[in-house]
Image (cartoon, grey):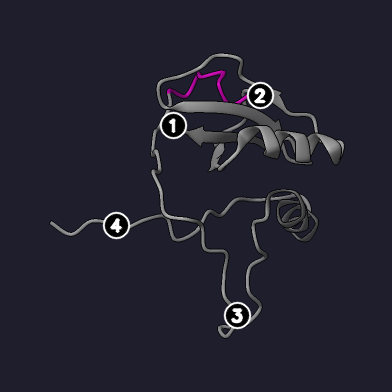
């Protein structure tokens, strides 16, 4: 059976796409979309990816109208949290130690939830 080999893109609507893309690049290191085929797009490190639909009434993502949440893997959650907080970004670290790693939550400037995950 043929299967997909990974996520090729993550596309979503934004009030101000250019400003939001710049925020993701500045604070999380996600490169901007290339402007030509000669440029290299953001290439994440290989690692586990969880693909998990949630019940439509979940409160896990935040506001009721929120239909998605992105989870980024990080190497050192403590350093990433400190870096973001030093830039004035509010980050909430989940105090629970999970068998699969550690987590933190923040929101982009448009209120979209972002989860950071340091796998074990």
Frontmost of labels 2 and 4 is 4
Q: Going from the N terminus, do you reach mark 2 or mark 4 first?
A: 4
| x then y, percent, for residue 95 | 61, 15
Total residue callouts: 4
Vertical arrangement, residue 26 with respect to residue 107, above or below: below
- Mark 3–mark 4 Cα distance, whole angstroms, equals 24 Å
- Mark 1–mark 4 Cα distance, whole angstroms, equals 25 Å
Q: Going from the N terminus, do you reach mark 1 or mark 4 first?
A: 4
- Mark 2–mark 1 Cα distance, whole angstroms, equals 29 Å
The answer to whether residue 54 is left or right of residue 44 is left
Residue topped by disc 1: 120
Magenta residues: mostly which secondary structure?
A: loop
- Tag 4 secondary structure: loop
- Tag 2 secondary structure: loop
Q: Going from the N terminus, do you reach mark 2 or mark 1 first?
A: 2
Residue topped by disc 4: 4
């Amino acid at each position: 059976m043929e299967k997909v080999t990974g996520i090729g893109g993550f596309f979503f609507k934004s009030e101000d796409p250019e400003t939001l893309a710049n925020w993701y690049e500045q604070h999380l290191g996600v490169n901007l979309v290339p402007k030509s085929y000669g440029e290299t797009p953001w290439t994440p490190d290989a690692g586990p990816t969880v693909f998990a639909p949630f019940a439509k009434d979940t409160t896990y993502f935040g506001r009721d109208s929120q239909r998605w949440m992105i989870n980024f893997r990080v190497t050192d959650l403590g350093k990433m949290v400190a870096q973001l907080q030093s830039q004035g970004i509010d980050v909430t670290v989940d105090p629970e130690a999970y068998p699969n790693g550690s987590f933190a939550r923040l929101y982009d400037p448009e209120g979209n939830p972002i989860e950071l995950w340091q796998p074990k």
